[in-house]
Image: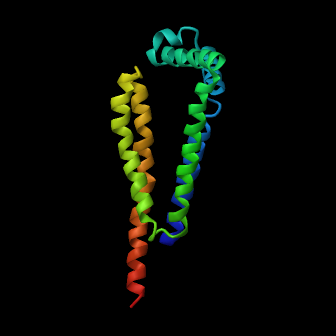
């Protein structure tokens, strides 16, 4: 498979993943209700056995109460979803012309790396369980992988084009 095709597949995957990760912020309350109902069906004592499960139930309850009393707070989730969609649109540039827009891929890699300090600083401040902080960090760790492959293929494509110019 040629480098350009590989780049486009990776970038398309990345864009879809960003959009999907973002749009899940819109129905956060509904998603948490479904998740907690599913967990409750597994075991009545599961929340007692695992602290993260109890925390998820608390997040669900907090979100339900907040949305009932202060629905405008959920507007922040709307902006979170929108930001993911806009960031995904940024990758249209490298999809079309990877060499000229290689900086966008590097920018994405920087964004992935900076998830780590954000999660490790803000997680404890917001009383987020450590295991959830690690889950948040996984977005950066797994997110950087396709971008690193993109850079490899962009460099290869750049090298091929330079060699074909002469």
Residue in front for this viewpoint, 160 or 119: 119
Q: Can residue 148 be seen from the camera position used here? A: no
Question: Residue 142, relative to residue 152: is it above or below?
Answer: above
Q: Position of residue 143 (x, y in %)?
A: 45, 47
Whether residue 115 is situated above or below residue 145 in the rendered picture = above
Counting from the top left corner in percent of width and height, residue 156 is at 40, 72
Quadrant for the C terminus in the image: bottom left
Determine whether, in the image, residue 45 is placed left or right of residue 27.
left
Q: Is residue 30 left or right of residue 98?
A: right
Question: Which of the 4 image quadrants contains residue 83?
Answer: top right
Name the residue at 57% across, 57% down. 12
Looking at the image, which residue is at 46% across and 15% down?
50
Pick whichever, 25 or 3, lies toward us: 25
| Quadrant assignment, res 120 | top left
Kindly tell me whether residue 119 is visible in this rendering: yes
Residue located 39% across and 52% down the image? 109
């Amino acid at each position: 498979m040629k480098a350009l095709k590989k780049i486009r597949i990776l970038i398309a995957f990345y864009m879809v993943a960003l959009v999907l990760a973002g749009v899940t912020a819109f129905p956060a309350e509904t998603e948490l209700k479904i998740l907690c109902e599913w967990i409750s069906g597994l075991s009545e004592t599961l929340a007692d056995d695992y602290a993260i499960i109890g925390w998820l139930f608390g997040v669900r309850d907090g979100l339900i109460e907040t949305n009932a009393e202060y629905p405008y707070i959920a507007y922040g989730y709307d902006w979170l979803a929108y930001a993911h969609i806009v960031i995904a649109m940024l990758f249209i540039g490298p999809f079309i012309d990877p060499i000229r827009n290689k900086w966008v891929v590097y920018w994405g890699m920087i964004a992935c790396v900076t998830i780590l300090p954000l999660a490790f600083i803000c997680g404890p401040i917001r009383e987020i369980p450590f295991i959830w902080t690690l889950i948040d960090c996984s977005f950066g760790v797994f997110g950087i992988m396709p971008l690193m492959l993109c850079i490899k293929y962009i460099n290869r494509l750049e090298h091929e084009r330079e060699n074909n110019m002469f």
